Image: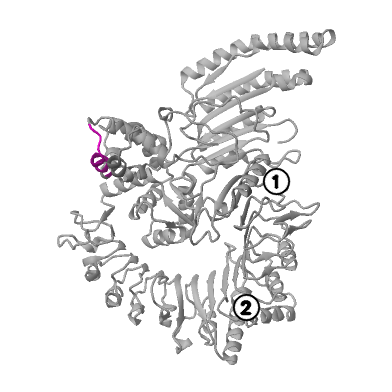
Amino acid sequence: MYFYVEVRSCLPGVISDVRKVHDYMQEEKDTEEEGDAVVEEMDEAVEEKDDKAVEEEMRRRSERLEPPLTISGMTVLVRALNNYAPLLVFHADANRRWRWFLTRYLIVIDDIKDIHLMHWNTVRKAFRDNGRIIVTTATQSTANRCCNHPREEDRCTFGYVYNMKSLGEEDSRKIALMGRCTPELVLGAEKLLEKCGGLPLALYSVACQLSCEKVLTGKFCNKLCNDLGTYLEREDQTNFTRLRGVLRDNYNSLPDYTVRTCLLYLGIFPMNHPLKKNIIIRRWLAEGYARHYQGRHQSVADENFKTFINRSIILPVVPISNTIEKTCKAQGIMHVYTLHKSMSNKFIMPFGSQHKKVRHFFIHDSNGGNSRIMHDIDLSYARSLTVIGNAGDTGSSFDKYKLIRVLDLEGCTDVKDCHFKDICKLWNLRYLSLGPSITKTPKEIVQLKLLETLDVSKTGVNVLPVEVIGLPCMIHLIGKFKLQDSFKAERMPKECMLETILGFVADKGKGFLQLMDHMKRLNKVKIWCDCEETKQGRVDLNNHLSKAIQKYTETPLGEDNVRSLSLDFQALPQGSLSALDQLCQHYSSRVGQTYHLSSLKLQGNSNSATLPKFVALFRDLTKLSISTTLSVTQHLLSVIGEMPVLLYLKLTANSIDDGFIIQDEKFRSLHSLCLVLKAVETSVLTMEDGARPEIISLQVICKDLVGLSGAEIMRLRELKEISLHPEVDEETRKAWEAEARNHHNRPNVLAIAGELEETPVVVEEEPAHEYHIREEPPVVEDEPTATRSTMSAEVEPESNATAPIKPGHVVGFAKGASMLAAEQPQNVAPSATC
């Protein structure tokens, strides 16, 4: 029997649907009795006829048990299963010889939401073998919930997630411009299509609006682009009704008012501006938009950011699991909607607007054209000012921002040292970032008693007054600087609030070491080692550095179990860094002494015998990154493999001696492995007998990679994504894609440049899956703000980018991909590839 259920909507079932299923179930009571007779006749047929005759008899008689069921609502589906599934299981167990024929099914559940997850186990348990469940969803957590289940009979996973891609530039132009492609029209529609972000429903809505014009020109496209937020807001614009409803529902469904406020705040940044997680969270905290009644404000801010990623409201710049939350960008059409909503409520405004009282101003103007001072604006009400480009006349009016909390001038090019003293008078300032025209920090900065974050990483500042360390509320200090040579430690407070220093330049001076006793809250430190000319200077540097690291790492981890250290000694001659040896000797001389770190990053060439000993000091590491111009030894890999909780490992080196070998009982917790190599000598990745790694993300960044280079990815049971260098040759790329297609999880194959965190370059590759589905745009009725996710499930009897990826997520459950090769579901978003 072939059981087919299509759930067209996951809204609760309406009364008519309930009656429909109830009537259907009443008929099933008679069908169940008839089913008993069918099974008995099949048993007789097996005894009297040959296999071909039995198959024909079974196929003919089973037609009476094949009524298609099309329903609306997840709840109704569960009610149907409670009555129908026992009949299905009965027939499957009555004659195992015909199990494959009696229990085939295809279930499509569209737009499943969190509230329906309570019913998911009912659906999953009712259908176990020889079938597929495809589920679309707009949230990552729902996709993960539907595919992650306890292993049974050593299954790797119950399902897998596909990330659906949005439409490309050419397809977007065909839909929105209805096939017209004159140069004037294409140029005028460029920004409009960019705001649509390749989302089919947005493009279709724009196409409907453009079709109302008698003569379509680029000028009208540009006007529609400028007024797009108004079209999304006004109820009389019927061409945008469906899109408006989806955007509004996505906004209103956010958990509470504070989360919605954090979302509206993101409208300050341009649509394509990179949103760095740490910067956004620090700004939310400075504004007071992420608060917790027990003081856990950081946790609330982290959860809000995670919510936006989970709903695809903001999108990862690099589609790799370990970097997904570091740098993101706003989703095009949702950014337009929230920006218009923010400006309508006078929550944020471009500087120079006609509104007298606005909480948040921004300037996105390279020539400063819209930054003229409007004398009737009351700047004392402003809480933040964000400048990208020239500040213009605003640079002479900092004293008017009486209550400002956030001053973000990181992208500002014309605020100079002469303006800094005026900024130091803003007593309520909590967040300050400065741009490249600033070269020194005045001592008047001590007046900013409430300052929590100071970011001088984009400035020319290389020396900070020690008073900055002593600011009573200072938490995050970001830049690359030294402290003033002479200061009195007794002038420092007994305990400072600093948690992040990124970072100090260590030299022969004692500045950093002297201050460690005052920094009990530190959990993130970066240190650059400065090259000393004299031998005594190098000795002093190593002594001070080893003592500072020792003090930093001796204290047990706090409740959040987070403490990171980044050490950059690339400026030192090879072999001149003895601080690591001193730490190892100190550890060996004190029995029971333990050093505590959760993240360690080392950049530079150190003694090949010392590095394994130093790394072995930190048993609590969950993240480890080592960058060297030498080769990585097998001894170092063996030491790293012993770390019980290591989740992320990145090795940047010339090569790895004999390749990366995973031995038995090594790397048991590793989820993400990144190898950035100049050359692959033998095999890039091999596994010994008994090794059972849990690697989910594998990145082999080597442009000279040839073929698979011996990589045994078939033994990586949990593998879901593979990243290669964008310049690998075509044969190598195809070899990896072919191997990925043969893997039971069918991991995506991407092309990513080496330094993911600095300059991500993503080359979009065809996925390693067999399904390429394209349909016309009107099909997408309830498209969420980001292209929704799809989950595909197939259960077997015995076993289980140059542009960012803009859509949501697609989940699949299966090992065999061939079942749907001939029968593809038709109601799929246009150009969805899974």
Q: Quadrant of residue 663?
A: bottom right
Q: Quadrant of residue 576?
A: bottom right
The residue sitting at 53% across, 61% down in the picture is 755
Q: Where is the C terminus found, in terms of image quarters?
A: top right
Q: Is residue 707 above or below residue 196?
A: below
Q: Which residues make up the magenta segment? A: 215-225
* Viewer-proximal residue among 561 and 188: 188
**Is 720 inside the magenta-drawn segment?**
no
* Farthest right residue in view: 47
Q: Where is the N terminus found, in terms of image quarters?
A: top right
Q: Which residue position is annotated with label 1?
A: 717
The kind of residue tagged 1 is Arg
Q: Which residue position is annotated with label 2?
A: 550
Q: Along the polypeptide, which appears first: circle 1 or circle 2?
A: 2
Q: Nearer the viewer, mark 1 or mark 2?
A: 1
Horizontal and vertical percent position of residue 98: 75, 19
